[in-house]
Image (cartoon, grey):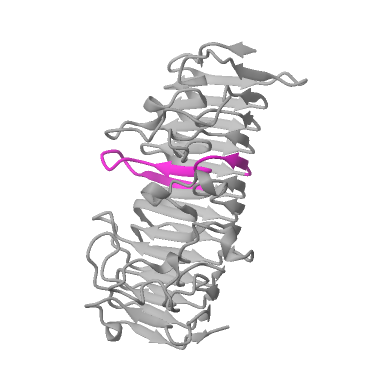
């Protein structure tokens, strides 16, 4: 079926099912399609969409889309999506294939009790006018989606984030979600981002080739790819048993993450460092959100290998970093002479990029790390023996417990 405008499901419809013909069904967005998405549902309840294909109208990667201005929801800003669900409940999206969608294959906005199961996404998303990604291409749950599950999906060759929650500060946080068992490959931004949310479990996902193609990475805004990313305020959440390889960026970002755990995850890079032009730190804590000072976070039993700078940049208080393996760190060889180009940053803090563990004095806002425990970790890499643990000006190592770490140059 060729579409020039959306299939608008009945507003406020109850007990609706849209299911494929057993021989297969495809919805095609024609080049002159105009509208929010191939399928738009608003105010629906007990809605099931299952078993068909949506083929988009992406003919060129370049677009006029930047990011939405003035806290405008993504569902109100981007057109030519696959499925847009608004203010609905008890919705199942299962076994649908999306390809060549110009923007987002799935956007869920202000809804609850959502299941996205066994969705397959390929070759989707577009770029800003400057050729960098505009975040599009994957699954987006925005503006306070509650009680949701994203499971068993396969996402590959998308220009932006693969799976993410997003809420502006003026909207409710997303809550009670489970993102698990998904397979992600060849994405130019984050594999999974939890943004402004509470009680989210991110478990048993796998990914490869993140931050590629490298020319799509939005370096102008420092939005390098992250395997497990955090934004806004996120608490009472778990990142566990996720596995990633070839991450051209950062393994785990904990900006605004507090009262949660990060356990048994891995990020492994073994190609030459030149294969990762945007390679960054292993784990970074941050406090950009005023409500998101990192505290009571457990980071344990993770394996992170082959990153450009140090193992952990830490701000906040009463966090525990224990029994992790950080291998082949500081691949940029910060601290060598002459200073490598990758290391020409914050020259007033020479240990910032070269130390295994660096206790910072700001992670967006000023911070004084106290009461943290850094214990029984293994760290190897260039200069790690001499620069195992360091602190920014004004930060006291003695105000934290640092013991039984093994740091070596190999």
- In the rendered image, residue 300, in percent from the top left (x then y), is placed at 49, 72
- In the rendered image, residue 319, in percent from the top left (x then y), is placed at 36, 72
Question: What residue do we see at 78% from left, 20% from top?
Answer: 23
Quarter of the image that includes the N terminus: top right
Please say whether residue 159 is one of the residues in the magenta stretch. yes
Look at the image and tell me whether residue 87 can be seen: no
Q: Does 293 sit above or below residue 52?
A: below
Residue at the far right in the pictured view:
23
Q: Quadrant of residue 243 in the image?
A: bottom right
Quarter of the image that includes the C terminus: bottom right
Q: Does 402 sit above or below residue 91?
A: below
- In the rendered image, residue 206, in percent from the top left (x then y), is placed at 62, 54
The number of numbered discs placed on residues in the rendered structure image is 0
Look at the image and tell me whether residue 316 can be seen: yes
Residue at the far front in the pictured view:
338
Q: Does 248 sit above or below residue 48?
A: below
Using residue 122 as the reference point, say whether residue 143 is left or right of it: left
Question: What residue do we see at 55% from left, 59% from top?
Answer: 276
Question: What residue do we see at 64% from left, 30% from top?
Answer: 96
Return the residue nearer the eye: 187 or 121.
187
- In the rendered image, residue 384, in percent from the top left (x then y), is placed at 48, 82
Q: Quadrant of residue 272 in the image?
A: bottom right
Q: Which residues are magenta?
A: 152-178
Question: What residue do we see at 58% from left, 15% from top?
Answer: 30
Please say whether residue 249 is one of the residues in the magenta stretch. no
């Amino acid at each position: 079926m060729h579409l020039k405008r959306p299939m608008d499901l009945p507003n406020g419809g109850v007990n609706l099912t849209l299911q494929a013909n057993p021989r297969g069904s495809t919805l095609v967005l024609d080049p002159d399609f105009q509208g929010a998405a191939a399928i738009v549902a608003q105010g629906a309840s007990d809605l099931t969409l299952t078993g068909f294909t949506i083929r988009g109208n992406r003919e060129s990667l370049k677009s006029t889309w930047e990011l939405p201005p003035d806290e405008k929801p993504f569902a109100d800003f981007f057109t030519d999506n696959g499925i847009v669900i608004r203010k609905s409940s008890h919705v199942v999206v299962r076994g649908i294939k999306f390809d060549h969608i110009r923007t987002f294959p799935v956007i869920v906005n202000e809804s609850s009790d959502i299941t996205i199961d066994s969705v397959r996404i390929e070759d989707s998303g577009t770029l800003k006018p400057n050729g960098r990604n505009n975040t599009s291409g994957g699954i987006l749950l925005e503006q306070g989606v509650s009680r949701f599950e994203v499971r068993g999906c396969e996402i590959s060759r998308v220009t932006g984030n693969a799976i993410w929650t997003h809420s502006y500060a003026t909207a409710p946080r997303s809550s009670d979600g489970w993102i698990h068992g998904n397979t992600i490959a060849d994405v130019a931004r984050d594999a999974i981002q939890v943004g402004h949310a509470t009680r989210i479990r991110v478990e048993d996902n796998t990914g490869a080739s993140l931050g590629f193609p490298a020319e799509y990475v939005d370096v102008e805004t420092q939005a390098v790819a992250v395997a497990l990313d955090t934004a806004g305020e996120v608490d009472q959440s778990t990142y566990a048993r996720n596995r990633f390889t070839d991450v051209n960026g950062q393994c785990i970002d904990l900006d605004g993450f507090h009262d949660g755990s990060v356990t048994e995850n891995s990020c492994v890079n073994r190609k030459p460092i030149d294969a990762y032009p945007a390679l960054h730190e292993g784990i970074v804590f941050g406090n950009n959100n005023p409500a998101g000072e990192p505290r009571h976070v457990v980071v344990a039993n993770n394996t992170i290998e082959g990153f450009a700078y140090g193992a952990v940049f830490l701000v906040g208080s009463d966090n525990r970093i224990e029994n992790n393996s950080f291998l082949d760190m500081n691949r940029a060889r910060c601290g060598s002479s002459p200073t490598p180009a990758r290391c020409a940053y914050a020259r007033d803090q020479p240990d910032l990029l070269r130390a295994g563990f660096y206790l910072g004095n700001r992670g967006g806002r000023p911070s004084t790390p106290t009461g943290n425990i850094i214990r029984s970790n293994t760290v190897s890499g260039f200069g790690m023996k001499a620069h195992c643990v360091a602190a920014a000006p004004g930060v006291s190592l003695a105000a934290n417990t640092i013991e039984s770490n093994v740091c070596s140059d190999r």
